[in-house]
Image: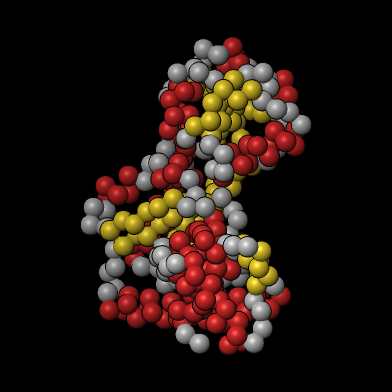
Amino acid sequence: MELTQLRYFQVAANYEHISRAAEALNISQPALSTMITRLEKELNVPLFDHNGRSIVLNENGRRFLKRVNHILTEVDSSKRELQEMANEHDNTISLAVSSSQFLQGMHTFMYQHLDYKWHQRVADNKEIISLLNLGQIDKAVTSPGIYGNDYHSILLSNDEFKLAVHKDNPLAQKKSVRLRDIQDERFIMLLKDLPFRIQTDRIFTELGITPLYSMECDHLLRRELINANAGVTIASQSASFRHLYSDNIRFLDIEDVHQTREIVLTYLNDRHLSHASKAFISFLKQKFSGDDLKS
């Protein structure tokens, strides 16, 4: 049994889909399928239940994955420690975020550390798990969803949902609203499958209302539309995101929404953090606490 086999199994287990796992590993689907079959024969037990290209870990697979995660974490940690001992002043920041919005405001840190090397990407939580386990990133900023003893998470923000409206919108005269009372407003919604959109859809579902969607768009276009008074949107008013909107925007309390939006920094427990990573983590804590952004 080789480490490569274990890494391929780990990614396949995280994605539970042959095509997506093969794409993440940059190998062909037949090659990945052959590797899984060979591994199952070597262990003499099936690890997955197969349904076309979809695969689901069975009890054997779940137990084996726990062992594999531990083994690969130890191997990667040892490798990194040796590398960092050889280069104690590693200045690489490798980061994944579940939303490009989380990258807003990080230019301040970049300007302060022009000698740092940056590797950034946007990915969903499943891909982030694989990137962390493969050592392709060493930290992630995301909504909660990466759990387990192998990961350490630091709560950066626990923010209330607000209704963002332009000052010329009649709603701006209010201090608070109920979503049930304003479902005929033109809501600007983020694209489907984005973490924040999933959260807001859940809010509407729990309230049993269907808002009038005027447009689905990305973060940048949503900001421009709200700043142009083209509609209203559910947004985060934390200090780390407030600067995305102009001074013409008002944030109203939402009386019938009690959920909060958590943002966490996640990395592997056994990950040895370089001086650059520690400095970046300190910056993130300050950024999300609002110490560097005053309203």
Q: Is residue 148 left or right of residue 243?
A: right
Q: Quadrant of residue 50?
A: bottom right
Q: Which is more toward the observer, 125 or 105?
A: 125
Q: Is residue 64 left or right of residue 118?
A: right
User: Residue 73 at what x, y percent from top left?
Assistant: 49, 76
Q: Give the farthest residue toward the left.
A: 115
Q: Which is more toward the observer, 164 or 218?
A: 218
User: Residue 5 at what x, y percent from top left?
Assistant: 49, 79
Q: Quadrant of residue 25?
A: bottom left
Q: Is residue 72 above or below residue 259?
A: below
Q: Residue at x 44, y 55 (%)?
A: 96
Task: Give the number of callouts.
Answer: 0
Q: Residue at x 47, y 85 (%)?
A: 2
Q: Which is more toward the observer, 55 or 250?
A: 55
Q: Is residue 221 above or below residue 143?
A: above
Q: Residue at x 56, y 50 (%)?
A: 143
Colour convention: secondary structure
User: Can residue 73 be seen in the rendering of this structure?
Assistant: no
Q: Quadrant of residue 160?
A: top right
Q: Which is more toward the observer, 128 or 9?
A: 9
User: Residue 71 at what x, y percent from top left?
Assistant: 52, 81
Q: Is residue 286 left or right of residue 58?
A: left
User: Can residue 82 be seen in the rendering of this structure?
Assistant: yes
For the C terminus, the image quarter is top left
User: Residue 252 at what x, y percent from top left?
Assistant: 60, 25
Q: Residue at x 63, y 66 (%)?
A: 55
Q: Is residue 188 left or right of residue 100?
A: right
